[in-house]
Image (tube, helix red, strand yellow):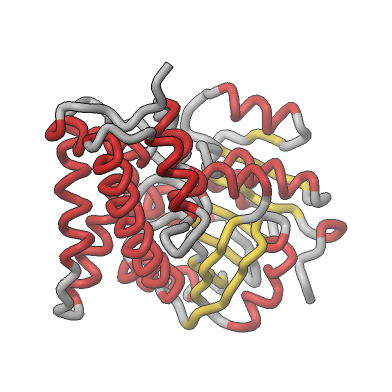
Amino acid sequence: MPATPSETTVGFVGLGIMGAPMAQNLMKAGYKLKVYNRSDRPRVQEVVDAGAERVATPGAAADGCDVIITIVTDTPDVEDVIMGADGVVHTAASGSTVIDMSTISPRVTQEIAEKLSAKGVRMLDAPVSGGDVGAVNGTLSIMVGGKQDAFDHCLPVFEAMGKNVNLIGDHGAGQTTKACNQIAVAGANLAMAEALMLAAASELDVQKVLDAISGGAAGSWQMTNLGPRIVKGDFAPGFMVRLQQKDLKLVLEAANDVKLAVPAVSLAHQYFNIVERLGCADEGTQALIKAYESQAGCEARVSD
């Protein structure tokens, strides 16, 4: 049976830049939420004010819930909130489903799924793409790994948060697909930065160049969504540089496991190293342009 809003309480662990609006969209769809976050931030209170019940541990968030969602920063964080002393595994009921929407190691995902299965708990790995804009608008792309029956059960939950929802394969397939996604994203981000930097170094109007090339074959999500932020000097994070670096390391590990060369990812990782050295690790990934600007001695901005 599908996990419909009228019959499903969702446990939600992780109310960050992505998690908070995703939780909000679940409540807008009619789901009742029990939420846990490790820190106190304004967005956490906003979710509570919208009707969620805040609890003290990940395990408490899972207690009594048919579906439990986790979306936290990195592989060790997922291991902690699911398998740790106060983790989901200790209270999740047999027959419930844990959906991890973080971006983590495919191998560790498979290990967690096996441990949950031993307790009668199903798991789906379901990382997302679309940034903060997609999280707010409920238009995320969701890449899912796991069993068909668990996917079918949770599809209404996914559809409350995203528009492009695909079951790719068994446990870990969602995470590997996210790695493929990050390869394409990193390459597009590099290409956009180099294009805008050449325009700036050639003393062209960067906004006019962006307008000219974004509507043709060069167009991309990065060009449409991040290009305008660059030329305005807006580096507020939709997705932080330090988190992109975490994802690129996962890509490099996955590629190494299958002995695959991914030179574009390696280059993007090195250029983001420069951005981090510039003190911009908590800025959005559009800050990649700053690595090029530091070398070119000019900025890709709109003139005042």
Q: Nearer the viewer, residue 283 or 200?
A: 200
Residue 261 appears in which quarter of the rendering? Answer: bottom left
Q: Nearer the viewer, residue 266 or 155?
A: 266
Q: Is residue 63 left or right of residue 72?
A: right
Q: Give the percent coordinates (x, y) of residue 164.
A: 62, 67
Residue 247 appears in which quarter of the rendering? Answer: bottom left
Q: Nearer the viewer, residue 36 or 298?
A: 298
Q: Nearer the viewer, residue 240 or 52?
A: 240
Does residue 57 appear in the picture of this structure? Answer: no
Image quadrant in which the C terminus is located: top left
Tell me which residue sits at (61%, 52%) in the image.
Answer: 62
Residue 98's place in the image compared with 135, above or below, is below
- Residue at far right of view: 6
Image quadrant in which the N terminus is located: bottom right
Tell me which residue sits at (64%, 42%) in the image.
Answer: 136
Q: Give the percent coordinates (x, y) of residue 273.
A: 16, 41
Residue 50 appears in which quarter of the rendering? Answer: top right
Q: Give the percent coordinates (x, y) of residue 44.
A: 60, 29
Q: Is residue 43 left or right of residue 185?
A: right
Residue 203's place in the image compared with 265, above or below, is above
Does residue 131 appear in the picture of this structure? Answer: yes
Residue 43's place in the image compared with 182, above or below, is above
Tell me which residue sits at (37%, 54%) in the image.
Answer: 79
Tell me which residue sits at (14%, 79%) in the image.
Answer: 259
Q: Give the percent coordinates (x, y) of residue 144.
A: 53, 71
Q: How many marks?
A: 0
- Residue at far top of view: 304
